[in-house]
Image (spheres, rainbow, N blue to C red):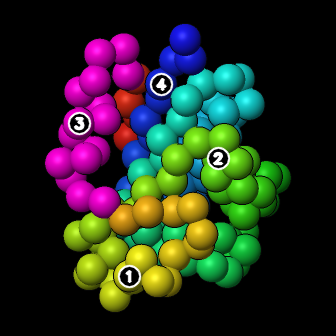
Amino acid sequence: MRRKLVVKVTAGTEDAERCNQAFTVAAAAVAAGAEVSLWLTGEAAWFGVPGRAQQFSLPLATPLVDLLGLVLADGAVTVCSQCAARRGITEADVIPGIVIKGAAVFAEEILTEGVQAIVY
């Protein structure tokens, strides 16, 4: 049975290192064989929109678009519904494979037995 990791990223370009750490940990966990659920909240919600991850830059870091691609290939990526609504982001706006869901779904995921949750 694969271990499950839920990573919630609350920062965007305004805190590039914290944002990149969340994506790096999520991608590394996928590569290690974990079942990963990455939640994009706050300003990180913008990375669910096509083209936004490509605009992110942090010296000496793996490009965010590559990390996001790794998670999408074998994990789940969700944009917070309230965060999306505040930014005018709809299901039609997000990258294929990314969904928009609310706090109840997040709570259900992290309260499942055996799940490890990390918030950045």
> What is the number of callouts on the image?
4
**Element at label 4:** strand
Q: Is residue 1 above or below residue 20?
A: above
Instruction: Tell me the kind of residue under disc 4.
Output: Lys
Q: Residues within 10 Å of mark 4 (few under 14, many from 20)?
A: many
Q: CA distance from mark 4 to mark 2?
A: 13 Å
Please name the residue that numbered disc 1 is placed on.
90
Q: Is residue 95 above or below residue 87?
A: above
Please name the residue that numbered disc 2 is placed on.
71
User: Is 98 left, or right, of 114 in this rendering?
Assistant: right
Q: Residues within 10 Å of mark 1 (few under 14, many from 20)?
A: some
Instruction: Tell me which residue sits at (72%, 68%) in the image.
Output: 57
Q: CA distance from mark 4 to mark 3?
A: 13 Å
Q: Which residues are magenta?
A: 101-115
Q: CA distance from mark 1 to mark 3?
A: 22 Å
Please name the residue that numbered disc 4 is placed on.
4
Q: CA distance from mark 4 to mark 1?
A: 27 Å
